[in-house]
Image (cartoon, rainbow, N blue to C red):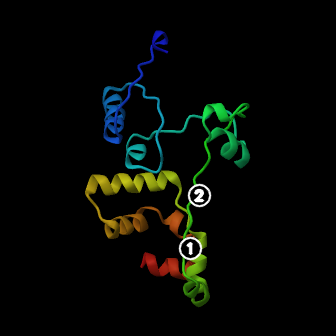
């Protein structure tokens, strides 16, 4: 890869990785690497996922081959990275007592770009959760208004 002009860097830590991204951005240089999302750094530098031209090849390929050591995976199928599943956990008492709250929790979805932008806001402004929630309500009505009834949305907007 070096002969092709690639510079391989072992950043040593998350802070080092963030620094390598910031340094490349500040210099107007390209940066190619692996990172997780959502994070403030993804949002701050508008990093994008590189399309590799394949879809996720299924749980079995992932669990029984890709996630195993190389010597335990004789014939891996090309695959995109699996999406992480995020679950909301509630008590039976809440489930039985409030269908409105349960429906809200079912409908709530945070698009990655919105979450990244909120993390940037929090980091840049040293904002706590309450500040971020107020900013989210103000800036992302098209997202949150899908989670509640129009009557509730009207009350939130004031």
Q: Residues within 10 Å of mark 2 (few under 14, many from 20)?
A: few
Q: Is residue 55 above or below residue 154?
A: above
The percent position of residue 116, horizontal first and vertical second, equals 43, 51
Q: Which residue in the structure is indicated by mark 2?
A: 85
Which residue is rendered at x = 31% and y = 40% of the image? 15
Q: Is residue 7 above or below residue 17?
A: above
Q: Secondary structure at mark 1?
A: helix
- Find the residue positioned furthest to the front: 71
Answer whether residue 46 is visible to the viewer in this image. Answer: yes
Asked if marks 2 and 1 touch (Cβ < 8 Å), the reply is no
The quarter holding residue 42 reads top left
**C-alpha gap between disc 2 and disc 1:** 15 Å
**Which residue is found at the position 56% from the left and 88% from the top?**
93
Which disc, if any, is residue 38? none
On the image, numbered disc 1 is attached to which residue? 105
Q: Is residue 54 above or below residue 40?
A: above
- Residue 91 at x, y percent in the picture: 55, 81
């Amino acid at each position: 890869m070096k002969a092709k002009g690639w510079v391989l860097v072992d950043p040593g830590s998350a802070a080092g990785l963030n620094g390598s991204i910031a340094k490349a951005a500040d210099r107007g240089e390209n940066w190619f690497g692996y990172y997780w999302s959502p994070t403030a750094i993804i949002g701050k530098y508008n990093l994008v996922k590189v399309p590799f031209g394949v879809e996720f090849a299924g749980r079995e390929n992932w669990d029984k081959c890709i996630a195993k050591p190389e010597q335990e995976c004789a014939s891996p199928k090309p695959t995109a990275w699996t999406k992480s599943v995020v679950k909301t956990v509630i008590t039976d008492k809440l489930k039985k007592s409030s269908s409105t709250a349960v429906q809200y929790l079912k409908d709530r979805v945070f698009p990655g770009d919105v979450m990244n932008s909120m993390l940037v806001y929090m980091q840049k402004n040293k904002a706590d959760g309450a500040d971020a929630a107020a900013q989210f309500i103000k800036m992302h009505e098209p997202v949150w208004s899908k989670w509640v009834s129009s009557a509730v949305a009207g009350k939130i907007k004031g």
